[in-house]
Image: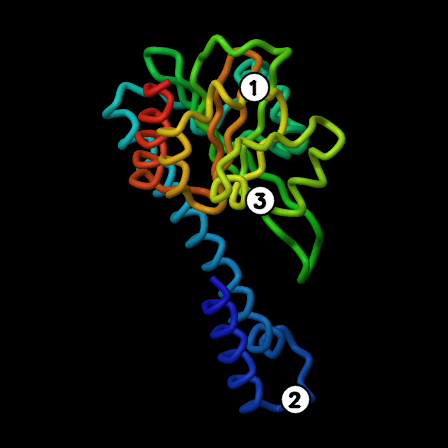
């Protein structure tokens, strides 16, 4: 997208250098500002096209597994869908909760899949924060919450006052993962086979257990193939419990 805009600016400057710079008529303005404006419009169109293609691939791939999707949910649908996951607003950093849910999906057996996105900063410091979450119904109670995530200062500080750190007793795992919450639930979930499976997890993955759900989150948007692999891997871990 930046390449399109930059190229259009270069074209505009090139055309502008060949004409009389004392002119201020509409034609002169069109020469200077027309190409950059066209570049911005083309970049927006290209970005929208890619986004629609990505969402279509998600709906298609997961539709093969029986998922139904709402790719443009209403505020009411977002609120209803997100209600069971209110705890993730703090646990996983889903700012403003349901408001920033982008799309939602549900499987025939009640597994829920959604994307959450918000923006911080402005101008050159703008940053887009996207999480893809798959949530499996479970019997984990609300009063025994657990967060398992790759070790990192930001997340550790965010949850520092929420719950104590749990040491599972395996040096390699304790070095690479931070576990906060219920010790009983930690040892129930983090069996040796689960710890082995998590050893190959990507850096942006985290797990959140409690309030009747096992949630796996990944800090990035995905296409259909990526989500298919993400959900299959999380499903295999949950089914092993």
Residue 8: x percent and y percent?
49, 73
**Coloured how?**
rainbow
Q: Residue at x 56, y 17 (%)?
A: 184
Residue 71: x percent and y percent?
43, 29
Left/right of residue 61 with respect to residue 125 in the rendered view? left
In this rendering, the label closer to the viewer, 2 or 3: 3
In this rendering, the label closer to the viewer, 2 or 1: 1
**Residue located farthest toward the right when viewing the structure as drawn:** 161
For label 3, the SS is loop
Residue 5, compared with residue 60, is above or below; it is below
Pointers 3 and 1 in contact (CB under 8 A)?
Answer: no
User: Would you call the spot at circle 3 few (<14 residues within 10 Å), some (14-19), or many (20 or more)?
Assistant: some
What separation in Å lies between label 2 and label 3 (alpha carbons)? 58 Å
Picture disc at residue 82: 1
Q: Earlier in the sequence, mark 3 or mark 1?
A: 1
Residue 176: x percent and y percent?
51, 45
Residue 38 vs residue 105, the one in the foreground:
105
For label 1, the SS is helix
Q: Residue at x 62, y 73 (%)?
A: 26
What separation in Å lies between label 2 and label 1 (alpha carbons)? 57 Å
For label 2, the SS is loop
In this rendering, the label closer to the viewer, 3 or 1: 3
Quickly name the residue at label 2.
Answer: 21
Residue 42 vs residue 108, the one in the foreground:
108
Total labels drawn? 3
Quickly name the residue at label 3.
Answer: 151
Q: Residue at x 27, y 31 (%)?
A: 60
Q: Earlier in the sequence, mark 2 or mark 1?
A: 2
What separation in Å lies between label 3 and label 1 (alpha carbons)? 27 Å
């Amino acid at each position: 997208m930046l390449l399109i805009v930059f190229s259009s600016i270069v074209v505009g400057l090139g055309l502008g250098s060949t004409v009389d710079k004392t002119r201020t008529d509409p034609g002169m303005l069109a020469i200077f500002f027309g190409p950059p404006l066209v570049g911005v419009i083309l970049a927006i169109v290209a970005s929208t096209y890619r986004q629609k293609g990505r969402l279509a691939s998600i709906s298609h791939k997961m539709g093969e597994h029986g998922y139904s999707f709402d790719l443009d949910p209403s505020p009411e649908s977002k609120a209803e869908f997100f209600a069971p996951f209110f705890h993730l607003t703090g646990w996983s950093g889903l700012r403003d909760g349901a408001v920033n849910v982008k799309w939602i999906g549900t499987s025939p057996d009640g597994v829920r899949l959604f994307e959450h996105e918000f923006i911080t900063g402005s101008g050159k410091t703008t940053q887009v924060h996207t999480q893809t979450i798959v949530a499996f119904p479970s019997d984990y109670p609300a009063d025994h919450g657990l967060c398992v995530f790759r070790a990192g200062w930001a997340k550790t500080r965010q949850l520092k006052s929420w719950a104590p750190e749990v040491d599972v007793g395996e040096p390699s795992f304790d070095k690479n993962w931070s576990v906060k919450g219920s010790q009983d639930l930690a040892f129930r979930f983090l069996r040796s086979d689960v710890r082995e499976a998590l050893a190959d997890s990507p850096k942006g993955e985290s797990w959140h257990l409690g309030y009747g759900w096992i949630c796996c989150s990944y800090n990035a948007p995905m296409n259909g193939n990526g989500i298919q692999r993400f959900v299959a891997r999380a499903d295999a871990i949950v089914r092993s419990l």
